Amino acid sequence: MTTQLNSSFRGTQDLPKWLSPTLLVSFFLASFGLQVLLASDSDSVEINFIPVAIFGLLGFTVALYVISRVIEGVRKATDRLVTIMVSTAFSLALIPLLSLAYTVVTKGVARFDAEFFTFSMRNVVGEGGGALHAIIGTIEITGIATLISVPIGIMAAIYLVEYGRGTVARLVTFFVDVMTGVPSIVAGLFAYALFVIFFGPGVRMGLGGAIALSLLMIPVVIRATEEMLKIVPNELREAAYALGVPKWLTVLKVVLPTSLAGIATGIMIAIARVIGETAPLLLIAGFTASMNYNLFDERMMTLPVFVYTSYANQGVDMQAYLDRAWAGALTLMLIVMVLNLVARLISKYFSPKG
Amino acid sequence: MTDTKPRAVRRLGDIVFANLAFFAGVSILATLATVAAFLFAQSVPAFTGPPIDAASEGFFSYVLPFVFGTVYASVIGLAIATPLAIGIALYISHFANRRFAQVLGYAVDLLAAIPSVVYGLWGILVLAPFLSPTFNWLNENLGWIPIFAGQVSATGRTMLTVGIVLAIMVLPIMAALIREIFLQTPRLHEEAALALGATRWEMIKMAVLPFGRPGIISAAMLGLGRALGETMAVAMVLSPAAVVSFAVLTSTNSNTIAANIALQFPEAGGNYTNLLIATGLVLFAITMVVNMVARWVISRRAEFSGAN
Amino acid sequence: MNNILKLGALAAVSTLVLAGCAANEDVAETPTSAAETPTEAVVELAGTLNGSGASSMAAGQEAWIAAFQIANPGVTVNYDPTGSGTGRAQFMEGATSFTGSDSYWKDEELLEAFPSCEPGTMPWEFPIWISPIAIIFNLDGVSSLNMDGATVAGIFAGEITMWNDSAIAASNPGVALPELEITAVHRSDESGTSKNFTDYLAKVAENVWTVGAIEAWPVEYGGEGAQGTSGVVSAVTGGNGTIGYADASRAGDLGTVAVKVGTDYVSYSAEAAAAVVDASPLVEGRESYDLATKIDRNTTASGAYPIVLVSYLMGCNDYVDDAQAELVRAWASFLVSEEGQNAAAASAGNAPISAGLRAKAQAIIDAIK
């Protein structure tokens, strides 16, 4: 026992606070210097920043771990190592995010004007026009898809967690996983085939798009809700039962509100997942340049289809089409940001405190 | 006095609610059965009708490169995304300070807001040119490793780029879900570990990760599903060829099933459409097999559920 | 509670703002000048006309629809750029009244039933969209190159691999060609552009390009695959030493190839493209209302550019619904008219059809019942 204590507490001092950042900077500089040396050897003048970053980080990690292990001990050293790894993971994820956001914002700003939000593309050729028809279409179709998916998804999750025991529940769980793998184009083809049975060939309807999207949303809602419901401690349920509350009221009033934050996040993830889907909407909701508010009649334009067709079918004035495509992408991003904010507000104000 | 257990009181509300939940669950099965039936019905003409040019050597030799491409791209994507997602979730829940964490969480959720078409555009216009020099470097210096061998693509639109794009697409979903789960770790467990003198990492290892493991696997399944079915981004970014290829830096990459359907469907006429839907059915089967394997791996450990 | 009310108010206001009609659709559409109205629009046309098909003419259809709807405010025309195959399939299901297609009716397709048409009648087709396919490349400091058919075929078949190859240098004296590998970009999706381009390669260089006119690129020839014309243009722009083929209207700043026709090297142009269509024979064994054309890729007519994409407009000779027949007559007449073709050329970059073709097409249109 004493030996163990000795080896793990061999280091009793903490590393000075300035050591870690200094090491980081010096290793990056060293790696950069090394790359410059190598580059001056060969012909190419290009300094490739990715190897610089990788080697700098590796060198820093190894150095800090060794120093920390010698001075502070194994446990602290491992802790530092994990901190580096986690921070790296986070920064790594931020880079593409920043790049994407930067690309979309800088390219989308060109057409981010009043005309874009108040015009449709009816009778517009080349420059000008707007995406109002696409924005309304996206909001309507995604709204209906959410209205269909959320109740079904939450109830199915409740079934899986609270009621399901036995074969049916196992089958449902398994097939929800399978459902997450349905490609969006297959969902679109399925919705189209379904509507053809009722309405004949060549049918184009906003509602069909909503059905295709809900096919893609439901598994996400179920999975997220299921995980959140499972986390609610059993003691809460038992306490409610002990007070004589029937099961259904327990679920509605105790379990669901406790997991509300997570469920709201799950729904928001599901909406974000489907709001940008192009392939199914192109097949069943169709392509149009005019306004259409009616989900049950004729073609309805949506933002992802707008973005894709503006990019793919450019005319002679290529820049005008590209500008509209990026402005549409920016609008889509903003819509989801707003929804995200709404989800967070809901979870902040409605979930129980403490 | 009987020895039987007293029967629980069944109120109307209970009956209604329980049945509603049951029907919701069953409707999932019904929907999927309908989708499967649709896929079967539409695939049959591909096998019984006149031979199709594209599948001149039989259906399985046609679909094999796509099966390989689908699995390969998803594996690369998940391999990159899972550790990153866990890392991000850990960082937001345990390493960053409270207010900063909220903003960070919001920022990562933003990635989920970006439509797949934009990922495709960004992949072609920004990521591929950026990675191209790195690919050249990898090919020159590490070309002896089989996956880095071959003739490097001049535009950077390779399987590795697609894997990275898929990873970035899948990341926010996984990170958001795992973050919510980590945030729900019982504080008592965490505090107890810290009180016993554990470092932050040890506390995470003892209290947070075991608690979150089923959730992490669920999130990974969600991410895998998304990666397997991703259509537009792969169709736009990948430079495909009808071969089975392990090399990730070349121009001749195996395409995925979903992307192939998206690419060929507009021009496909007659039986070719049915052939493409038959490949969709194969994707369905792949998803089932992969999920079966994953569920089997999970079931070997007891699942933690508060509702036990 | 206050916060909920605030949120609700915000939501309501934004809904009202968004639900407002599009500013450009409130105003009643009136023809802006007499010169823009088709001279036949005497009767007030009304109704909805649905079509789908090739995405190659999508930009052109936008221009046509806009002009037609302005001249005939009671009509709404919809064109889904779903692709030629899907377009023909939908027409054969009776879902659309007209379709645009990159390839003419196949013989087996003509044997099927056409629900939009009176039973026993056949559909018509004629070329409506002529678009030159440019061979684009990205090479520092070079904006134009001369190549003959065999060289082009060799590049895309993967046999000529370096830019400073003797075959390219021979026809371009004085141009500094770098020692750089050629990356040939092709279409990863099946497309009429690929088919027309490879048809050209197969006809002019059959010993080099041995696979004929294909839509799906053979694996052995290698090269990069990109989705859609936009994808090919992005790929060529994004790499150095890349070469590809795409609709000429999208060539932009990229370098283009002048191909050898007879003894000269011809660059793409609208007149050159239209010339080739006129010089080509019709497909044999078709009725008089079927103007399917076999493009003569080996043409030696001076100033003709043989790499063209010809898309067809297809419809019924005798519609089940007479109202649709009236709409289609007006619509098709506008499409083949000089102002229609020029309107499309201005915003979509196609080559207007010749007067001879216009006369033949108009005769078919006039016979629509």
Image (cartoon, rainbow, N blue to C red):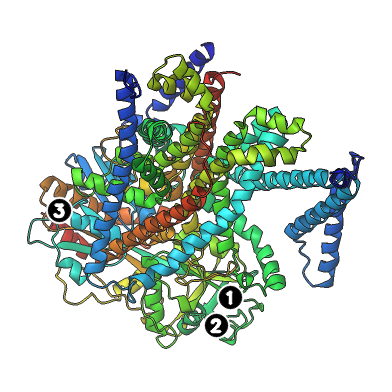
Q: Amino acid at mark 3?
A: Ser
Q: Amino acid at mark 1?
A: Ile
Is residue A13 left or right of C91 when viewed as pictured? Answer: right
- Residue B238 on image: x %, y %: 51, 62
**SS label for mark 2:** loop
* Vertical relation: B273 (above or below) B187: below
- Residue B85 on image: x %, y %: 61, 45
- Residue C276 on image: x %, y %: 34, 74
Q: Nearer the viewer, residue B184 or C121?
A: B184
Q: Same chain for the residues at labels 2 and 3, yes or no?
A: yes
Which residue ends up furthest to the front in the rendered image?
B1
Residue picked out by circle 3: C116
Q: Nearer the viewer, residue C165 or C70?
A: C165
* Residue C182: mark: 1
Q: Earlier in the sequence, mark 3 or mark 1?
A: 3
Residue found 36% across the figure and 70% down from its top: B60
Residue picked out by circle 2: C160
Q: Chain of mark 2?
A: C
**SS label for mark 1:** loop
* Vertical relation: C339 (above or below) C257: above
Q: Are marks 2 and 1 in contact (CB under 8 Å)?
A: yes
Q: Are marks 3 and 1 in contact (CB under 8 Å)?
A: no
Measured Cα–Cα span from mark 2 to mark 3: 50 Å
